[in-house]
Amino acid sequence: MRIDIKHIEKLIGSGDRLVCLEGSPAAALEALSAYARTSARAIYCWHPSKGLRRVSAPHIAIPGTDTLRGALKHVQNTRHYGVYAFHGCAKELGDPTIASLLQSLASPPQPDRLILLLDGGIHLAPGLRRTPPPRRTARTATRA
């Protein structure tokens, strides 16, 4: 599957909170960078050797995010919308603490945000395999 800006836009508009992208992590990161240049949305990327960084300011690492746990805690404590892409984290997803953090981030009432896992062959904990979509309120469900 080819990952491009339109694919990223669809993911952001889907309402999903946790998505595993199959395919080339490099292509996904390239599409996220291109999307960040044309959008006002906050897009962040994490890699074990670099920590969490905003795509529009890649030279600045966010303090305390050099580990996956630290980066997920940062996302959990952030109250604004953002797209957070994680690359190089597949080995750590079996850790119960990491799985618990991801479950918390993917579930309401957390603020809307999108977590993208970019490694191929990701094996999620059973509780993360199917997270329900965000609930609609009566007001939004009745719009035509």
Image: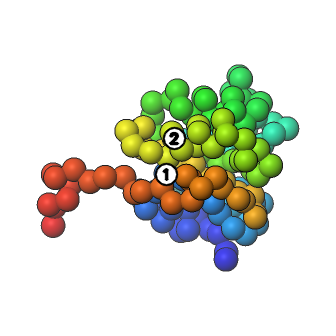
Q: Is residue 52 above or below residue 125?
A: above
Mark 2 vs 1: CB contact within 8 A? yes
Indicate which disc residue 119 carries.
none
Q: Tell me the residue at 59%/37% (across/down).
A: 101
Number of marks: 2
What's the mark number on residue 105?
2
Instruction: Residue 69 in the image: state x and y as whole percent.
Output: 69, 33
Q: Amino acid at mark 1?
A: Arg
Q: Seen in the image, is 142 located left or right of residue 79?
A: left
Closer-to-camera residue (103/39): 103
Give the mark nearer the N terminus: 2 vs 1.
1
Examine the rendered structure and indicate whether residue 57 appears above or below residue 113: above
Residue 77 on image: x %, y %: 52, 27
Residue 136 lies, with reference to residue 43, above or below; the image says: below
For residue 51, side relative to residue 11 (left or right): right
Q: Is residue 75 visible?
A: yes
Left or right relative to 90: residue 34: left
Instruction: Sort mark 2 into few (<14), some (14-19) or many (20+) by Cα contacts within 10 Å.
Output: many
Q: How is the image coloured?
A: rainbow
The numbered mark at residue 17 is 1
Give percent across and percent down for residue 130.
Answer: 51, 60
Relative depth, front residue between 113 and 108: 108
